[in-house]
Each structure stands twice: as structure tokens, then as C-alpha cells.
Image (spheres, rainbow, N blue to C red):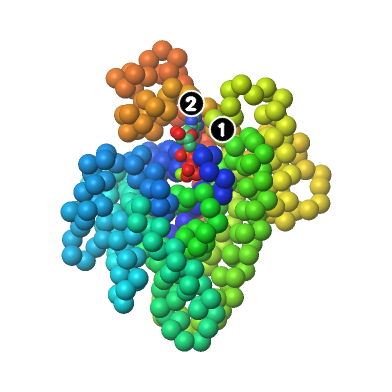
Amino acid sequence: MSVPVLTFFNNKGGVGKTSLVYHLAWMYADMGVSVLAADLDPQANLTSMFLEDERVENIWDGDQGTDSSANTIFQCVEPLMRVGDLQPPNLQPIESQLGESRLSLLPGDLALAGFEDILSSEWPNALGSSELYRSFRILTAFSTIMQMGAEAMGATVILADVGPNLGAINRSALIATDYVVVPLGADLFSLQGLRNLGPTLRTWRQDWQKRRVNWDKPAFALPKGDMKPIGYVVQQHSIRLSRPVKAYDKWVNRMPRVYAENLLDKTQGPYPTTPDDDENSLATVKHYRSLVPMAQEARKPIFKLKPADGAIGGHAGAAVDAQRDFLQLARTIGERSFSSLR
Ligand SMILES: Nc1ncnc2c1ncn2[C@@H]1O[C@H](COP(=O)(O)OP(=O)(O)OP(=O)(O)O)[C@@H](O)[C@H]1O
Ligand SMILES: [Mg+2]
């Protein structure tokens, strides 16, 4: 059995994908669910949230690896760009309890952008009749590497962070994905993003199925590529403060319909008129304001900030509220995905 992969995806940038993966990864670890956080975005922002620059530099320079493992997602796939096979990942432990890693990171790499071309060129080849092994090995590399990492650490779930685009790297990340969570900002661009995202996921899913059936006797396990949308998360931070509340409501209240139509193919109404009444709305994440730089500085999730980190007075209360909100979100996402499988 493969470990379920949840990917946080929207081709609109800056909607809080990386922050969500970071906070939920910590929250699941706190809940006793072992998590592999995978940074599949060539911007590597998730990696820089988890790790100090010096540690990132060592990892990128390959100082920490053993002969048979690679430190970043790019180092894992890099031999595929020559004649070699992929390498198992050398995960970075973030938190352990009683000697067992509860939270580990598969580090990202700016060099991953260099893998995009080969993913594009192998996509049509997987429909051909020769060299199928190599094509599928490349197209499913992210899946294989994440599953190897999850097995090595005994993870229950994999949370993947991806960049804001619909390119070949993300197509391979989505092939590896069982469940998709869509973070949304309250603006025209986020809603427009949904109109591209829904049809793109459908096409990727169908195109992957065609390829899977083209290989009668796969030589290794191929991911199913379900990429099932389990809901959206409304991000309050992506609204400019000067905008009136009415403008916020206008965009937010369109989300239930645009999500249902584009992600779930529900073209018949009626639709809920606000996310509060919509079962597809997983949560509304608050604007955490000055807690955000405080958490970045302390390299902690917002809900772990302590007075020593500067979280005093109202900030301390906000950190406690964040703990409650993220716990609720983690439970809701779990119920709709990996924990429903148990
Ligand atoms: N709840 C929040 N409150 C306040 N600021 C937030 C919140 N969530 C995220 N941010 C800030 O918004 C910015 C974008 O967030 P983030 O990097 O998580 O988005 P993203 O969707 O991953 O972006 P990209 O598309 O570039 O990968 C960051 O500066 C982050 O600190
Ligand atoms: Mg990001």
C-alpha cells in the first residue's frame, strides 16, 4: 500500500500554499501522525521555512549525503537526466520523538527547474511502445521518491508543496497525488485560477490513465493519479487592507459555485451562497499579521510561538487561537483523506 499524498495546489501564486503545508505538517506531527513534507516547488520556499540557510547550503552542496542517497528532490532525480536511475532520498529530520521521526522534510532545490524539459519530452513517449520503462521511471520519479522516503521514516501521510503553475513538474507532482486541497485568496485572480485548475486536473487525470493502461506489465508500482479535490481553504491574508468588506464578500461568496463547477463538474445549482454554508470549504485561515514575521524569525509555526519569541499579550492569545484553528483544519482534511482510509 502506498502512503497517501496530499498536494496543496492553485496556479495562482502567493495564496498561502507553502504556509499551509508548513503549519499542517507541524500540526499532524503534534497530533502523533508521522508526516513527510515534500518540497516539489523549484522556488524551495518550504525548505527555507523549515531549515536555516547554513543547513540548506550544506544540503544543496551535498555535504550531508551518503554515497547511495541524495539530499534534495533534484539530487534524487538528477541521474535520470543521464543514463542512471533515481536515488533514494536522504530526508531531513525536523522533529523526532523517542528516536522516531514524526516530521521529516524532503528538501527542495532551485535546480529542479532543470528537470522540467525532460518531463515534457517523456510525456508523449509514455503512449508509445518502446522504452516505456525509462519514460515511466521519469514521469513517476516524484511519486517513487516520496514513497521511498515515506516508507523509510514510516510516514502516515505525505504533504506536498508545489509552485504556482500548470507546467510539467506540477503535472508529475499531481500524478503522484491522491488528494488536492485548493488554497484561495478572496480576489478575481484566485477565482480565475480555479477556472484553469479544474479542467487541467481533469485532463491530467485522464491523460495519465491512458498512459497507465498503455503499459500492460509495469515493472514497478505506478501511482493511480486520483488527484481528488477535497475542498478549498479561504485565505484572508491575501486581501489588501484598504479594500472594503463588501469587495471581500463579493469574491468569497462566489467561491462555492466556481469551485463546484470547475473542480467537481457540478454544473447544476443551487450553490451555497457563502463558504460558511459550503461543505467544500475546509476553513477560513485568518490574517496572522505580525505573528508571521515572528514565526519566520523563530522558525516555528505560529501556534508554537511563546512569550520568549515575542508572543506576549494579544499575540499570545492569537497563537492559542491559531492552534485551535489549525487543529480543526488538520482534522477536517484528515477525515476527508488519509484518516478515512484507516
Ligand atoms: N495566514 C496568513 N496570514 C498572514 N500572512 C500570510 C498567511 N499565510 C501566508 N502569508 C504570507 O503570504 C505570503 C505568501 O504565502 P505563501 O508563500 O505560503 O504562498 P504560496 O501560495 O506558497 O506562494 P507561491 O505561489 O509563490 O508558492 C508569504 O509572505 C506568507 O508569509
Ligand atoms: Mg509556495
Residue at 28%, 54% in the rendered image: 91
User: Farthest residue in the bottom direction?
Assistant: 129
Ligand 1 within 8 A of label 1's CB? yes
CB atoms of marks 1 and 2 within 8 Å: no
Graded by Cα atoms within 10 Å as few (under 14), some (14 to 19) or many (20 or more), the crowding at tag 2 reads some
Residue kind at label 1, given as amino acid type:
Ser
Residue 213 higher or lower than 47, as above or below: below
Compare residues 186 and 105 and report the one nearer the observer: 186
Identify the disc placed on residue 288.
Answer: 2
Element on which disc 1 rests: helix
Q: Earlier in the sequence, mark 1 or mark 2?
A: 1
Residue 129 higher or lower than 40, as above or below: below
Residue 69 at x, y = what percent?
24, 63
Element on which disc 2 rests: loop
Residue 112 at x, y = what percent?
38, 58
Residue at 76%, 36% in the rendered image: 273
Q: Is residue 149 visible?
A: no
Compare residues 250 and 316 and report the one nearer the observer: 250
Compare residues 241 and 67 and report the one nearer the observer: 241
Q: Point out the image quarter for the N terminus.
A: bottom left
Q: Is residue 3 rendered to the left or right of residue 287?
A: left
Residue 305 at x, y = what percent?
36, 25
Identify the disc placed on residue 194.
Answer: none
Q: Is residue 177 rendered to the left or right of residue 31?
A: right
Residue 198 at x, y = what percent?
65, 55
Ligand 1 within 8 A of label 2's CB? yes
Residue at 41%, 12% in the rendered image: 313
Residue kind at label 2, given as amino acid type:
Tyr
> How far is mark 1 from mark 2, CA to CA?
11 Å
Identify the disc placed on residue 238.
Answer: 1
Q: Is residue 2 rendered to the left or right of residue 85?
A: right
